[in-house]
Each structure stands twice: as C-alpha cells, then as structure tokens.
Amino acid sequence: MKVVEYGKDHRDVIVLLHGGGLSWWNFQEAAELLQQDFRVVLPVLDGHAGSDREFTTIEANAAAVIDYVERHCGGHAALLGGVSLGGQIAAEILAQRPDICRAAVLESVSAIPMPMTEKLVGPMMATSYGLIQKPWFARWQFQALGIDSRWYEDYYRDTCAISREDMTAFLRANAAYEARRELACTAAKALVLVGEKETGQMRRSARKLQELIPDSVLEVLPGLGHGQYAINHGEAFAKKLRELLRETGG
C-alpha cells in the first residue's frame, strides 16, 4: 500500500482515507495543519492513481490499512477517518479491529446497500468511461461534485489514471456495502458527519452508523453535499479532529 505522510516525527498517528475517484490530496489541507502535532498517514486506496494494487474489495483495503498500522505505526492510531468509500473502509477497519484507534470520523458514508445502483454501475461505465478523459466532461463532473476549484487539476489527473476495471469495481463495492454489526464493539469515540444536502439514503446511513457505534455523535453539516467537508473546509475539519482527540485524551 502506498501512503503519503506528514509530520513523521510525531508519535500520535492520524490515518485518513480518501473518497472514491480522488486520492490522498482529499486531506492535504487538513494534513498540512495537523502535521505540527501529529503524524498524518494518507493511504492511496487500491485501484486509484498512484496505488500499487488493483481494487478488489472494501474488506481487502481495510486489511491492508490494518497491516500498515501494525507494521509502521505500532499497531494503533490516535484517530482513523474516512470520506465516502474511504469512510466505508474506515468503518470496516473499526469492525475488524475494534481497538485500532481511540477516535474516528466518518464523513458521507453509505452504510445501507443500494442494489439498483450496484446493477447500474456496469452499464453506466460502459457508456461514460470513455468521456472521463475529455476535459469538458471532467469539468462538468467535477462541478457536479461541488469540490472547490483549487482541486480540479489533481482531480482530472488522477481520475484519468483510474482504469475502467478499477472504477467499476470500487463503484460496485461502494453501492453494495453494508455496515457490519461488529461496529458495536469498537472502542473508538466516533463522529459521524453527513451533509445537509445529501440524499435521504445517505442521511439514513448516517443514522444507522450512529445507532451501531456506541456513544457516537451524528452531526449534520449545514449547506454541504456529499464528501464536501474535509476537502473544501480543511481548516475546520482539522480543528474538529483536534477537538475530538482532546475529548478522547490526546
């Protein structure tokens, strides 16, 4: 697994997992602010630009992150976080290793399967994948995501580098994912974030995660859509992580 790291000299580790179709720069602004006090580890998810493996499953990605934490971070992180697909992987990590961190942040995480969406991924990719490298289509898609314009060049470069097979695989996995009941065993203090403008399915997923994870807190982000908080508001996101870590003893 390839990673980008900030603040390597610090003991306390924060691991943040980017959204599907993006890369480590999803958290670049926050990492640059947090590196003064924390070691911030930003893995590149399988099947994404710069990764060293094809995408197979959410569970396999979770296992790879756990292995990295065990081999390179002393087996424990102060905080684990993720957005969208990365948030699903973070939730899977919490289910597989309940003691891996003391705090967790899950933003815009789908925890309820979407069978119809999963079925449509293949036909959708058959008709639209060829458009991804066309600047006019990439710009339209980027604007639809509501991501700040400063990230467009990174988005366009890295989206073009994802193969059709990998994109199909992680979009299907994202649509099929269901949060595991083992989340109830996690020792982490969890903050569940969902945008005010997200779909009903996403808001239901946020409530499900809150119900599954003991003593978790659900926060609705005013005026925001899917996955827009960490990437567009890095300073506020970093501040929220610091607050959560202080609450949990760090």
Image (spheres, helix red, strand yellow):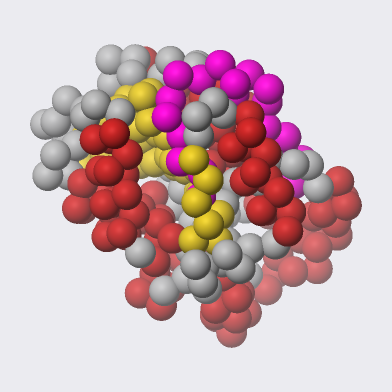
Query: Left or right: where does residue 215 sit relative to residue 148?
Result: right
Q: Position of residue 183 (x, y in %)?
A: 59, 24
Query: Left or right: where does residue 72 sit relative to residue 146?
Result: left
Residue visible at 51% across and 72% down in the picture? 223
Residue visible at 61% across and 68% down in the picture? 197
* Residue 233, placed above or below residue 214: below
* Residue 176, placed above or below residue 108: above
* Residue 243, placed above or below residue 56: below
Q: Which image quadrant for residue 43?
A: top left
On whether residue 176 falls in the magenta region, the answer is: yes
In terms of depth relative to the viewer, which is nearer, 207 or 165?
A: 207
On whether residue 184 falls in the magenta region, the answer is: yes
Farthest bottom residue?
Answer: 136
In terms of depth relative to the viewer, which is nearer, 236 or 139?
A: 236
Q: Where is residue 192 in the image (x, y as percent from the top left)?
A: 51, 44
Residue visible at 33% across and 19% down in the picture? 76
Question: In this view of the protein, can residue 41 be seen by the observer?
Answer: no
In terms of depth relative to the viewer, which is nearer, 31 or 196?
A: 196
Q: Position of residue 33 (x, y in %)?
A: 19, 53
In terms of depth relative to the viewer, which is nearer, 189 or 110?
A: 189
Find the magenta span and give its range: 170-193
Q: Looking at the figure, which quarter contains the N terminus?
A: top left
* Residue 243, placed above or below residue 92: below
Residue visible at 14% across and 31% down in the picture? 10
Query: Left or right: where does residue 123 sit relative to residue 64?
Result: right
Q: Looking at the figure, which quarter contains the C terminus?
A: top left
Q: Position of residue 217 (x, y in %)?
A: 49, 40
